[in-house]
Amino acid sequence: MTHPFEIELETVLPASPDEVWAAIATGPGLDSWFMGRNELDPREGGTATMEIGGHREDAVITAYEPGKRLATRTATAGNGRFMAFEYLIEGREGAATVLRVVHSGLLGDDWEDEYDALRSGWPFHLHTLREYLVHFPGRTGAPVFAVAPVPGRPAEELRAALARALALPQPPGVGARVHVEPAGLPTLDGEVVWADGERFAVRAADGLYTFHHGAGLVLMFHHLFGPRPEGAEAAWQQWLTGALA
């Protein structure tokens, strides 16, 4: 049985409406702070596509008003499930922009867990958007994804393993410094800028690095703004596997 939901958030971003629009309504912009690899056909009726780990999801653009409003909706699945997103932009004096996000739709049988994950995830995503606009303005991030299923291992144990591999205190806290040399990758030298019970994120001079730790599963979503090393995704996948061994 499906269950309707709606999540609405508003944030003030230290960027112009044009900069915010480029971040939310273009593939390269979304690649720089959101999840996966994104493509967007810039017109009402066009297609917005997200690909993560070999899984692709398409949505129809139901509203496209440059600098003001973007809305998308996925197709309705056989069980009635769908997702709709709406982004509303309003300029403010002092080179600031108000962004309102409305995420709604119908969830499936395990709707309570999924809703909790969505509700806790959006504040983090908007924080990442802010980090991108403030620290990497005008640049395009290359998304890097890695996943490690580890059945039976609790989230606390996985978070501790990641913290050890990054030489971080346990649990990792905002402001903690990171300095590690992952094999086959540039040195990661940065600062924890987000930490909660599900994830922590590190900002470095060359990118935003995110580590999600749920029971039985670890995901990494990185956004690299420097020269992307050849084989970066494979090297991070190898690092993750080793960190959780």
Image (tube, grey):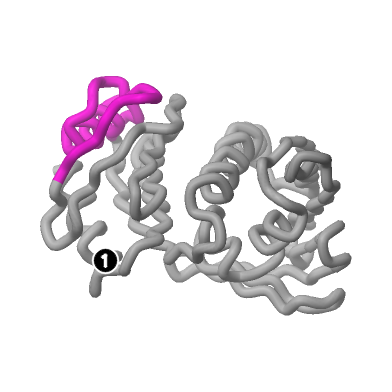
Q: Nearer the viewer, residue 93 or 102?
A: 93
Residue 222: horizontal and vertical position, in percent?
39, 54
Q: Which residues are magenta?
A: 153-180
Left or right: 13 as drawn, with respect to 36? right
Q: Residue 177 vs residue 4: left or right?
A: left
Which quadrant holds the C terminus?
A: top left
Left or right position of 239 against 143 = left
Residue 2: in sight, yes or no? Answer: no
Identity of the residue drawn at 25% across and 69% down: 229
Q: Is residue 172 magenta?
A: yes
- Tell me where residue 69 sits by quadrant: bottom right
Residue farthest along the front direction in this orientation: 94
Count of numbered circles in the view: 1
Residue 89, placed above or below residue 57:
above
Q: Nearer the viewer, residue 64 or 107?
A: 64
Task: Return the residue at label 1.
Answer: 232
Provide residue 179's location: percent of width, then percent of height: 19, 39
Q: In the figure, 26 relative to 3: above or below?
A: below
Magenta stretch encompasses residue 101: no
Residue at horizontal 55%, vertical 45%?
134
Type of the residue with mark 1: Ala
Q: Position of residue 91 (x, y in %)?
A: 83, 47
**Residue name at image x 70 percent, y 54 percent:** 20
The x and y percentages for residue 41 are 72, 79
Front in this rendered view, residue 60 or 193? 193
- Quarter of the figure with the N terminus: top right
Q: Residues within 10 Å of mark 1 (few under 14, many from 20)?
A: some
Q: Residue at x 59, y 43 (%)?
A: 130
